[in-house]
Image (cartoon, helix red, strand yellow):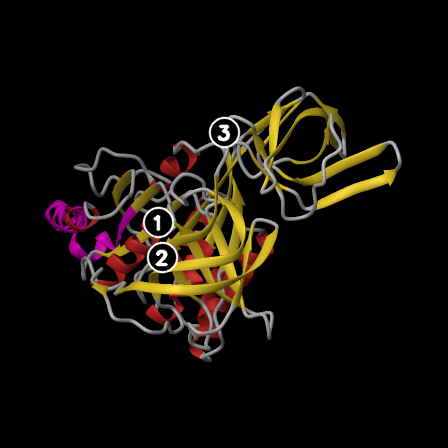
Amino acid sequence: MKTMLRFITAGSVDDGKSTLIGRLLHDSKSIFEDQLSAMEKTTKRRGLQGIDLSLLTDGLQAEREQGITIDVAYRYFSTPKRKFIIADTPGHEQYTRNMVTGASTANLAIILIDARRGVLTQTKRHAYLASLVGIPHLVVAVNKMDLVGYSKEAFESIVAEFSDFAARLDIEDIVAIPMSALEGDNVVEKTENMPWYEGETLLSVLENVEREQDIGDFRFPVQWVCRPGQGFRGYMGRIESGSVAVGDEIAVLPSGRNSRIREIHTFDGPLLEAVAPQSVTLLLEEELDISRGDMIVKRDNQPKLSRTFEAMLCWLSEEPLDAKRKYLIKHGTRTSKIVFEKIDYRVNVNSLEQESGIASLSMNDIARVGLRAQHALAADSYAKNRATGSFILIDEFTNNTVAAGMMT
């Protein structure tokens, strides 16, 4: 079975992001004939030669030009080796929240740099955000190499400057590729224009990068208690991480009661073992008082249970934070009231400076905060487990999502 890789593209305005996505789809034969025909006609109508590959993502640009709220645009394609989901994220600072949203489920980030302009403030901001949400793989795509004469020196200078900055971030794997999305150099096929580059093409990196498996600590937030009859009491939900097998000793949080897995059911029938991200129904040997919001974990491998914790928070709402108000926290399947105890600092996402003395947060602000929940939450640090280390905050009056957070 082909694996799935989710990746985001991020970059500054006019650095060729739309053309790169178009080139990837075109050269990997992922564009339908009618799409190709329509693009050719539109390109001709504009008095241009060939095919304007950026037309595939022009809808998003049109929205941006009209001042409409921009969301993340998703595109799908497949090769014989792997399936892909691209999250095309806006580059402007005022869309920081949109990039955080798109990056939160990504396995890899492509950060485009215009070879003529080099490393910009936006480049650093995108790299920081990729690091913040725990993306393990980063591709630095130095684009428009054709406009600097395919210069090895220009490429190496940009890579050196980016590497100096990236050393301050927590990113495990960084690959730099010189390319021209317009000409197709090193996107899907190797180019002869840069014989000095001996690395992989972009598509080769995407197809072969190791995708981290969702194996780890077993975490199962209960979504629903299933009781179709007297003889059946099952707990339904999705395994967020790890695996579970019949006979495993488990604990239920926050009560701390213990039992053992008796049966595992799925839509396709019973299993002896299940792994993330399967949706299953668990039956236990003992009848315990379990409800939506509880978490089933391995008895000898439990997350921290606490009402107070610290987190990195991205404020998403146009309404600024009112630290005196109560908000709701949704963590897994549990919802609880929460209050702000402190704002340690706000991060200047352009310079990475930590600004203290902050009393409130505005849209797109990122800050380290201290929170206290009404009920204890079974949580891991985000660095250890992205599923159980993340949460959202909700305005209890409007029911709007106002912030996304990562527990530290």
Instruction: Tell me which label, 2 or 3, sits earlier in the chain.
Output: 2
* Local crowd size for mark 1, using a 10 Å CA cut-off: few (<14), some (14–19), many (≥20): many
Asked if marks 1 and 2 touch (Cβ < 8 Å), the reply is: yes
**Residue labelled with disc 2:** 10
Quadrant, the N terminus:
top right
Q: Is residue 38 left or right of residue 356?
A: right
Instruction: Name the element at disc 2.
Output: strand
Magenta-colored stretch includes residue 142: yes
In the displayed orientation, state which residue is furthest to the right: 229
Compared to 187, does 120 lie above or below? Answer: below
Look at mark 3 in the image and give the residue it sits on.
301
Q: Amino acid at mark 2?
A: Ala
Neighbours of disc 2 within 10 Å: few (<14), some (14-19), many (20+): many
Is residue 72 placed above or below 197 in the rendered structure?
below
Q: Which residue is mark 1?
A: 110
What amino acid type is highlighted by mark number 3?
Asn
